[in-house]
């Protein structure tokens, strides 16, 4: 009689059970609103056919939800008619409807540890919370941070479970083996089961028998299995059926799925971060990247210029864009700043962030944003989004989830570009031990060894192009964007003690490097959040998500150390996300995470002192040495005699030296506000240099005799005059 209250068209089995659940809760004294909380979907029981069916009204709501998501991503002037990653995946799988949904977020940490469950585990460090795609173990495997989920025993009753916390259209599973230097563990086949209450489970089948999906053949390369039909449920399990003969049941997993419409908007409130910026949120091929830069240049021709610094091994140009109020020229007193990304081709988030940054700065400049206008007018900014386009192409070809941890990391000819620079640390430190600094070896602008510059040197073409670029432009501050972690590292990147892999190795400018690193990390949305989950093994949030590079792991010949020791530029590395290659749908949130940090770090180029070194005739003095008392690292003036010295607030004694000029010193004070203190110098020629200049002007060479001979010369002339010259 109860169901007579409702029209007959409503009385399908699933809805009847839903209504019954609501009425039962009312009969037990619970309000309707209480039922609609987080556990609402736990109470909804669906029969087998509804694992494959979306009610018509819900389907329309889902389409509206996805359309709104696309609008949030921004169909701006930058967005062209090119395929999304979902469309590319659909083509790659023969047009299957099941490849449209994005990853749920095991790799990006959107899925919390409490949402992951397993039948058993070998030990805590191999628990279900470690069963995330591409998660990495430490060098020494321990009880806390290991490389995947491993079952406590090897049998077909084991399972790995994900609780989506809401009805979800599951479309595919991606699996890997265990990340380990010492073990070989992976699953070779598995079944997939779904449930709405975590008690009653339905196994995916082809109508007559359960489906068994092929798993992995080694431990690192991800394997995607799309479902023949999507499955609508709250829980999903992976049930291993076979595994490597010499190994154990161990897995790293990602689930692809689309969340169903949420009547309480609970999922949206907790997991989505909208952005109001109308930018081109997608992964760009090389051609598309070039097109974005071209569109930015066409929209903002007065403040942008596109140029290339060289070519990759495969002949792709390394394009950079300059953003300045006078593009193409170095302006006296205006500091030069650079961001680079993609030295590891598979760490693509930095590449997309720089493409978004150039779009954002162009838009905001045109709209009258005073902060952006001031930054552009007072700074010459260079953005190089893809240092290693050849490596990127390899990762881009397989897509964001299937590249693994290393595909595309190196240049085409096998070089790690970020660590392919000459090891100037050893040259400087050996000279210090032999007391040759600063008499024969300066503490800055350490020269590149001859062997490195030879044609036979093991140097990537991309690295040579970077060095030529760094030597040509007087950069003051730079950041290279990398991926796979949430931390900012600063020099030195190589340990000073031989044979030590982790050791605090500070530069003479350690205090300002710490500040520069903190300026980025503290303004990032997640880096310094003590509640965030560790990406892999190390909790950098305990250290404000900044670390000396050598204290993390030693690396000789890094771009950061080379930049500091060979040029005036202070360079840091920003690891901008746990996921090296996030799915396209994650880009708006990653932009929100990093946008303020990208701007704040650029503004730090105006912290410290700046000025011009001139002679008494008002001409700029090139290559004059700027020394700060108490800091054993000098810089040099640029071609026009201007200089910039990044410093923390305080009072400093600054000395200028140049060949043929008398050293000059003065006190310069740095305040707490952004804006470098002006500290100019006028230096005069020494008497000896003036005599040399006069004599050279008349075609004569200066006479350099010992002091005693000079003192004896008048007496010698008198004797010769009186007694005659002796033969």
Image (cartoon, rainbow, N blue to C red):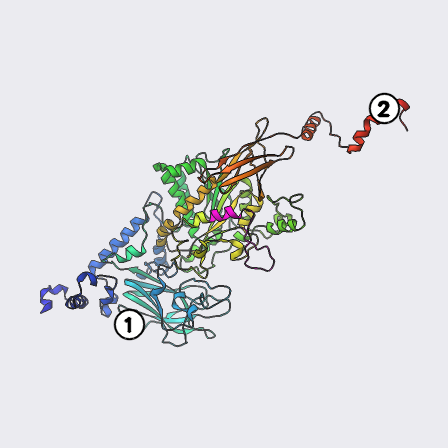
For the record, the magenta segment spans: 491-517
Q: Position of residue 420 (x, y in %)?
A: 56, 52
Residue 550 appears in view: yes
Instruction: State the residue at coordinates (58%, 59%).
Output: 500
Q: Is residue 727 left or right of residue 374?
A: right
Asked if the stretch drawn in magenta spans residue 464, the answer is: no
Residue at 27% across / 62% down in the picture? Answer: 166
Q: Residue 522, which numbered label?
A: none
Judging depth in this view, the residue of 161 and 451 nearest the camera is 161
Magenta stretch secondary structure, dominant: loop
Task: Please tell me whether mark 1 or mark 2 is closer to you in this view.
Answer: 2
Q: Position of residue 449 (x, y in %)?
A: 63, 48
SS for dot 2? helix
Packing grade of label 1 (10 A; few <14, some 14-19, many >=20) is some
- Say few, some or many: other residues with alpha carbon within 10 Å of mark 2 (under 14 / 14 to 19 / 20 or more): few
Frontmost residue, 362 versus 442: 442
Whether residue 574 sits left or right of residue 230 in the image: it is right
List x then y, in percent, for residue 481. Answer: 46, 50
* Residue 425, percent from left and from top: 60, 51
Distance in Å between CA atoms under marks 1 and 2: 119 Å
Please give the label number shown on residue 718.
Answer: 2
Residue 501 is inside the magenta segment: yes
């Amino acid at each position: 009689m109860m169901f007579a209250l409702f029209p007959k068209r409503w009385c399908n089995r699933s809805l009847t059970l839903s209504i019954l659940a609501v009425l039962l809760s009312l009969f037990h004294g619970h309000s309707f609103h209480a039922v609609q909380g987080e556990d609402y979907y736990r109470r909804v029981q669906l029969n087998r056919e509804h694992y494959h069916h979306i009610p018509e009204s819900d389907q329309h709501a889902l389409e509206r939800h996805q359309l709104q998501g696309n609008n949030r991503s921004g169909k701006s002037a930058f967005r062209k008619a090119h395929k999304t990653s979902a469309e590319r995946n659909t083509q790659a799988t023969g047009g299957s409807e099941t490849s449209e949904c994005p990853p749920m977020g095991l790799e990006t940490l959107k899925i919390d540890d409490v949402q992951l469950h397993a039948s058993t585990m070998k030990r805590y460090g191999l628990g279900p919370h470690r069963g995330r795609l591409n998660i990495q173990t430490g060098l020494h495997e321990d009880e806390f941070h290991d490389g995947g989920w491993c079952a406590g025993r090897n049998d077909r009753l084991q399972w790995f479970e994900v609780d989506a916390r809401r009805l979800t259209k599951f479309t595919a599973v991606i699996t890997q083996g265990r990340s380990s230097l010492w073990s070989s563990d992976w699953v070779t086949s598995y079944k997939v089961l779904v449930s709405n209450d975590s008690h009653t489970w339905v196994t995916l089948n082809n109508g007559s028998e359960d489906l068994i999906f092929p798993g992995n053949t080694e431990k690192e390369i991800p394997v995607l299995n799309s479902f023949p039909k999507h499955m609508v449920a709250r829980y999903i399990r992976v049930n291993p059926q076979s595994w490597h003969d010499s190994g154990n049941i161990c897995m790293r997993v990602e689930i692809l799925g689309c969340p169903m419409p949420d009547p309480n908007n609970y999922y949206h409130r907790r997991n989505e971060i909208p952005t109001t910026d109308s930018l081109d949120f997608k992964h760009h091929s090389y051609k598309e990247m070039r097109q974005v830069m071209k569109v930015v240049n066409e929209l903002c021709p007065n403040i942008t210029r596109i140029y290339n610094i060289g070519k990759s091994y495969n002949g792709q140009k390394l394009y950079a864009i300059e953003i300045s109020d006078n593009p193409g020229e170095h302006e006296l007193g205006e500091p030069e700043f650079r961001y680079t990304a993609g030295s590891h081709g598979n760490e693509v988030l930095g590449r997309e962030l720089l493409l978004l940054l150039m779009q954002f700065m162009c838009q905001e400049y045109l709209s009258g944003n005073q902060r952006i206008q001031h930054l552009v007018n007072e700074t010459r900014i260079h953005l190089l989004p893809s240092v290693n386009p050849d490596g990127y192409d390899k990762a881009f070809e397989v897509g964001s989830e299937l590249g693994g941890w290393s595909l595309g990391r190196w240049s085409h000819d096998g070089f790690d570009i970020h660590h392919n620079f000459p090891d100037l640390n050893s040259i400087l430190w050996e000279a210090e031990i032999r007391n040759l600094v600063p008499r024969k070896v300066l503490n800055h602008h350490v020269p590149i060894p001859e062997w490195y510059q030879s044609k036979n040197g093991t140097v990537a073409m991309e690295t040579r192009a970077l060095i030529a670029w760094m030597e040509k432009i007087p950069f003051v501050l730079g950041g290279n964007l990398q991926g796979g972690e949430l931390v900012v590292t600063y020099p030195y990147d190589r340990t000073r003690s031989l044979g030590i892999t982790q050791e605090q190795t500070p530069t003479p400018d350690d205090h300002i490097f710490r500040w520069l690193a903190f300026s980025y990390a503290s303004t990032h949305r997640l880096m310094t959040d003590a509640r965030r989950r560790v990406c892999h093994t190390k909790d950098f949030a305990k250290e404000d998500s900044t670390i000396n590079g050598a204290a993390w792991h030693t690396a000789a010949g890094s771009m950061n150390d080379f930049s500091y020791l060979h040029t005036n530029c202070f360079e840091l590395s920003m690891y901008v996300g746990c996921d090296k290659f996030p799915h396209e749908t994650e880009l708006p949130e990653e932009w929100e995470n990093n946008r303020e940090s990208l701007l704040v770090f650029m503004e730090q180029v105006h912290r410290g002192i700046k000025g011009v070194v001139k002679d008494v005739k008002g001409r700029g003095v090139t290559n004059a040495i700027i020394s700060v008392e108490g800091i054993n690292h000098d810089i040099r003036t640029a071609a026009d005699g201007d200089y910039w010295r990044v410093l923390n607030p305080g009072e400093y004694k600054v000395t200028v030296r140049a060949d043929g000029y008398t050293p000059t010193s003065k006190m310069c004070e740095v305040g707490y506000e952004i804006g470098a203190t002006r500290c100019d110098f006028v230096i005069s020629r020494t008497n000896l240099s003036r005599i040399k200049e006069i004599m050279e002007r008349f075609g004569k060479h200066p006479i350099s005799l010992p002091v005693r001979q000079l003192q004896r010369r008048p007496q010698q002339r008198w004797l010769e005059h009186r007694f005659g010259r002796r033969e």
